[in-house]
Amino acid sequence: MISALIWVPKGASRRIPEKLKLTDDEMKMLSEVAIEEEEEQSAMEEAMEAEDAAAEAQQSQDEKDSTGLPASFKMNDYDKEDDDAAIRNYIGAGAGAIEDDEEEDEVDGMASDDGNVAMQDEENDDQDDELDIDKEDVEIRPTDSVVVVASTEENFSNLEVQVYDDENGALYVHHDINLPAFPLCMAWMDCAPVPLDPRTGPVDGSFVAVGTFKPGIEIWDLNVMDVLEPSATLGGEQDDKLRDVAMPKMLKRRKSCKTVLQPGSHQDSVMALDWNSSHRNMLASGSADSTVKVWDITTQKCLYTIAHHSNKVQSVRWNPAETTVLASASFDRKIVVLDGRQPDAFSKFQLSAEVESIAWTPHNPSTIVASAEDGVVVGFDVRVNGSTPLFRFDAHASAVSAISFSAQVPGLMATAGVDKTVKIWDLKDNTPVCVISKEMNVGELFTLSFYQDSPFMLGVGGSKGVLALWDTSENEAHLFGCHTSSAKSLRLKKSVKRRRRVVKKVGKVKKGTKH
């Protein structure tokens, strides 16, 4: 399934992304994990061999044939017609074993030499593979559109950095990032999570913040391929140094220990994220712990916490014009709007059901629109506290999971529902009119977003794990066959293989595991 998607602004991606280069600390960490996994495997094999030997000894002691002699002598077989065969079966076993041992020793010696050659060949092949990568295959052209998709299949979660070639109508996965937990939300940002230089401001880049069922917020560098761990984590576990994506066994053992969270961390799942494009070091988050937090990306510290909700916070959005104004929506059926400079002063707006999604209208930033679990979409003027809705209408027969506005066409809004349909609305004069409705054929819909660099391009994701792109100026939505289950499984296998190869190079591990 696709639980979230987000577009990367055109020109923000590096033309040729970097390949991962492990630091000395990362090499040491992976080496330690590899050695420990080998020791565990050896200990397990020794224990199993000892258990088998004990069982065989007990069986030899307990089992006797009718002659009273050990069963291994097969004395009963002498009564059978083929007596000679029975004798040969026992006597020949020793000779055969000696011959087999000699052959095995000889073969083992050959295999050892061949193994060293094979290992060297494999390392050379890996190097050749890296050298053979054609720059054209990884190049992101200025005309390309990049969308990041949070995908989960068979308990395997990852981010797919997908590139859409509008000229040829082709979509492909450029690279992916393995995640340790199910992704719930994302926010793109151009601010690097490094200390701020007052003279130059935040460092530019292309990053995505990811909220999962864990309390930490991971920030991943989209310009680096084959990355094993995030660039930074906001909150989360205090001792979370080893990544699930690289060493799942280690973290399974660590889960038995008491979890200690970073100061200022959320206490539960992170369900909502939004980056402030004007104050580039600021990121807002909403959590199942009923709080909203504002973070400084450059220091990875929580600036302040807002506790105005009584239930899970499902959505947060910075106002595009009044850039210190923040809105949040919760399962408590309320929208809270406040100024981050005075977070204790706020306005509340009531809905008829649990809020699923909120969005500011880009061309009328005093209006906020919300969708709810009962299929209703409602708009409020936030300048009037607790005001009656500007409009209210039944958008879908069931929950409206997401809403999005075109950044370039005033009043153009899209809604997605678990009824599997997308609807396009014209909100001119606060009088909503449904322009078109389309079933997207990607299952129940969980996320959609207009592309900020195109007036009509819309991305949609749902339960089938297929990304649909729809140019809403046309009547046809494009589903891309490369996202079928079998193709995705192949990509997952490649991701696991690549991860294993990194560990193998460091620690000579023959096998890795998928988290």
Image (cartoon, rainbow, N blue to C red):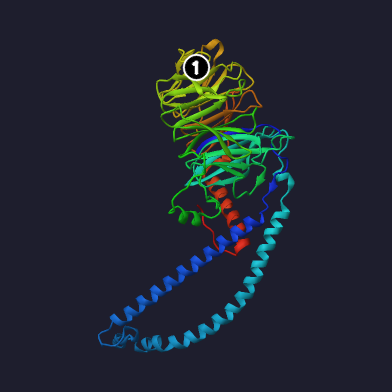
In the rendered image, which quarter is residue 477 located in? top right
Which residue matches tag 1? 379
Task: Please say if 358 is above or below 503.
Answer: above
Q: Give x and y (percent) for residue 110.
A: 62, 77
Residue 204 visible to the viewer: no
Question: Secondary structure under badge 1?
Answer: strand
How far across and how far down the image is residue 474, in percent? 60, 23
Q: At x 28% / y 80%, what residue is drawn?
A: 62
Between residue 419 and residue 180, name the one nearer to us: 180
Q: Residues within 10 Å of mark 1 (few under 14, many from 20)?
A: many
Residue shown at 58% from the left, 51% from the top: 495
Q: Would you say residue 439 is visible in this rendering?
A: yes
- Would residue 401 be found to the left or right of residue 68 on screen? right
Classify residue 349 by image quadrant: top left
Q: Residue furthest top?
A: 429
The location of residue 1, given as percent across then percent down, is: 49, 39
Most foreground residue, 45 or 262: 262
The total number of labels drawn is: 1
Q: Is residue 139 above or below residue 276?
A: below
Query: Which amino acid type is marked by label 1?
Result: Gly
Percent of width and height locating residue 301: 57, 39
